[in-house]
Image (tube, helix red, strand yellow):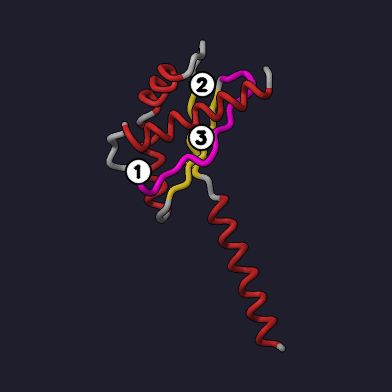
Amino acid sequence: MNIKRVRRISSEIKKVISNCIINSLKDPRIDKLNVSVTDVKVTNDLSFATVYVAVIGDDDKKKETLEGLNKSKGFLKREIGNNIDLRHIPQLIFKIDETSEHGMHIENLIKSIHEEDENVD
């Protein structure tokens, strides 16, 4: 499949899911203010879409949010079908995006190394 088309579809799915989280989902486990869709990766055959979400909060909050999103898969697939012209709607797989937390951890390590260097001098 054309790589540009797959990227465009990924982008459109990201927009639809983000919009649904903000405006349509009523699940109390999903805190609209602390959840954002960071990326969507669609397979070349358009059978699966991995949706990466960033959740502000502890591990329990992240687990709760994933449960809410997984329960909402049917609704989200219907919304994708209504907004994007596709023959087959991909199966949604939700995963927590930990890249921002990983980046903050690395930044803190670098900061602590610089502080140790300053204290040694």
The earlier-in-sequence mark between 2 and 1 is 1
The foreground one among 95 and 82 is: 82
Which numbered disc covers residue 65?
Answer: none
Callout 3: few (<14), some (14-19), or many (20+) C-alpha neighbours within 10 Å? many
Residue assigned mark 3? 51
Q: How many marks?
A: 3
Element carrying mark 2: loop
Task: From the top left corner, tell me how far across and down residue 55 is, in percent.
Answer: 43, 48
Q: Which residues are magenta?
A: 32-46
Q: Is residue 55 above or below residue 107?
A: above
Instruction: Kindly indicate the quadrant of the structure image that contains residue 11.
Output: top right
Identity of the residue drawn at 58% across and 56% down: 102
The picture quadrant where one finds residue 25 is top left
In the rendered view, tell whether residue 85 sits above or below residue 75.
above
In the rendering, which numbered label is found on residue 90? 2
Real-space Cα distance between discs 2 and 3?
11 Å
- Residue hosting label 1: 32
| Percent of width and height locating residue 100 | 55, 53
Q: Residue at x 53, y 56 (%)?
A: 101
The amino acid at mark 1 is Lys
Question: Are the residues tagged 1 and 3 within 8 Å (C-beta)?
Answer: no
> Which amino acid is tagged 3?
Val
Q: What is the secondary structure assignment of the residue under circle 3?
A: strand
Q: Please identify the quarter of the rendering in which residue 2 is found.
A: top right
